[in-house]
Image (cartoon, rainbow, N blue to C red):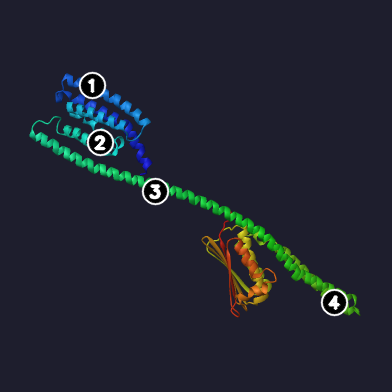
Amino acid sequence: MTCTAYEQPRASFDTWGPWALLAASVVAAALSARLIGMDRSETAVSGVLVAAAVVLQVGWARVKRRRPGPSRTGAGLYLLRWAMGFVLTWINPFFAFYAVTGYYTAGRELPRRLVMPGLLLTAVTMSGSEIGGMPPHGVILWLGFFLVLAINMCLVSVFTRYAEQEQARAAVQADTIAELERTNTALQQALDENAALHAQLLVQAREAGVADERRRLAAEIHDTLAQGLTGIIAQLQVVANAPDLDTARVHLERASGLARHSLGEARRSVHNLAPVALADDGLPGALTKTVAEWGERTGVRAGFTVTGTAEQLHDEVSATLLRIAQESLSNAARHARPARVGVTLSFMGDEVTLDVRDDGTGFDPAAVPERTRGGGFGLDGMRARAERIAGSLTVESEPGHGTAVSARVPLVRHDR
């Protein structure tokens, strides 16, 4: 039970409990008055004290609304109520129903140093009622009174200690719950900030990706289209100076072949400007098609595997991994001369891993920066792509023992 769930019924009992106990004691005293032998004066005094108890309870409620908790005023009212309860119980033991109010209000109305004295006073009243009324007549009844008083005080001490322990435990639980709420709030703020950082990172990756595509396209134009056009111009110049028709026809066919090849390279470059394969399929579907088409085009046995539970990834994450796969396959076809290539996409909790392995010629990864320093996309470009979305790329290779390219990036879902 939480502290709030405990305080609500307790507050209700504090408000209505004294009234109910006072009413019960009045009814019990009225029914037992003739049996006990109350005379008219005792009945009159009881009526005055009951009326005073009503006034006291009304005034007490007003005081508690203004100043809840222990106070000097509360201690004075507690002592006054005890005195009235003691006199009423002296007149008729059944008024102890009202006097018992002191047991459960001492801890809330009295300062800590006065709690036990207040409980002792209430125990005196209750003990007098339990032996049949005050004052005791004879030594036996006095001994019985002190025995009952001792038992009451022992019980009061035990229950008071238990109540203090429960209050301390409730306070600790309340502090723990408050700390958990603060921690949850801080965690939610951290998650929100992390989501914002992810979004900002992906925007930056998209902008950087555009610049990379421009550089890649420029490099491809220089390496393929420009060279093809240069070759065509050279062949046409030969045609212009050809000594006979046969020689001109040969060079025209060469120029035509170079033109068709350059056209194909231009179409391939335009096609690669954006990951068109992702428009209709998710990353697993796009990789399936990419690997299959690459295998058909190169004649290399290629396979694609998905491990883990596939999820719809953010567009930038999907595009990055698809580009890395395409570049890895392109490098394998150009340099490795493999007989077999395997591509694996692994969904692992909060990460996604792309592995591209071949059994080709392999190379020394330490020498790659020297070979690619002049430009191009290659391994440095793939590594830059992965790092822009907080990922990493590793390459394991050895001459004659194939190559393994592994990209590991955060799993950012499509809805973020």
User: Could you tell me the amino acid type at mark 4?
Assistant: His
Q: Is residue 285 left or right of residue 109?
A: right
Q: CA distance from mark 1 to mark 3?
A: 50 Å
The percent position of residue 218, horizontal first and vertical second, equals 74, 66
What is the quadrant of residue 288 in the picture?
A: bottom right
Nearer to us of marks 3 and 4 is 3
**Residue carrying label 1:** 47
User: Which numbered tag is attached to residue 176?
Assistant: 3
Instruction: Name the residue rendered at 25%, 42% in the picture.
Output: 159
Please report whichever mark, 3 or 4, sits nearer to the chain's N-terminal start. 3
Q: Is residue 290 above or below residue 34?
A: below
Q: CA distance from mark 3 to mark 4?
A: 87 Å
User: Does residue 267 appear anywhere in the picture?
Assistant: yes
Instruction: Name the residue rendered at 20%, 36% in the picture.
Output: 123
Q: Residues within 10 Å of mark 3 (few under 14, many from 20)?
A: few
Question: Do the residues bearing badges 2 and 1 touch, measured as CB atoms within 8 Å?
Answer: no
Nearer to us of marks 2 and 4 is 2
Please report whichever mark, 1 or 3, sits nearer to the chain's N-terminal start. 1
Q: Is residue 156 above or below residue 36?
A: below
**Residue carrying label 2:** 103
Instruction: Name the residue rendered at 87%, 74% in the picture.
Output: 237
The quadrant of the picture occupied by the N terminus is: top left
User: Could you tell me the amino acid type at mark 1?
Assistant: Gly
Please report whichever mark, 4 or 1, sits nearer to the chain's N-terminal start. 1
Q: CA distance from mark 2 to mark 4?
A: 116 Å
The percent position of residue 395, horizontal first and vertical second, equals 59, 72
Q: Is residue 96 left or right of residue 379?
A: left
User: Could you tell me the amino acid type at mark 2?
Assistant: Tyr
Q: CA distance from mark 4 to mark 1?
A: 132 Å
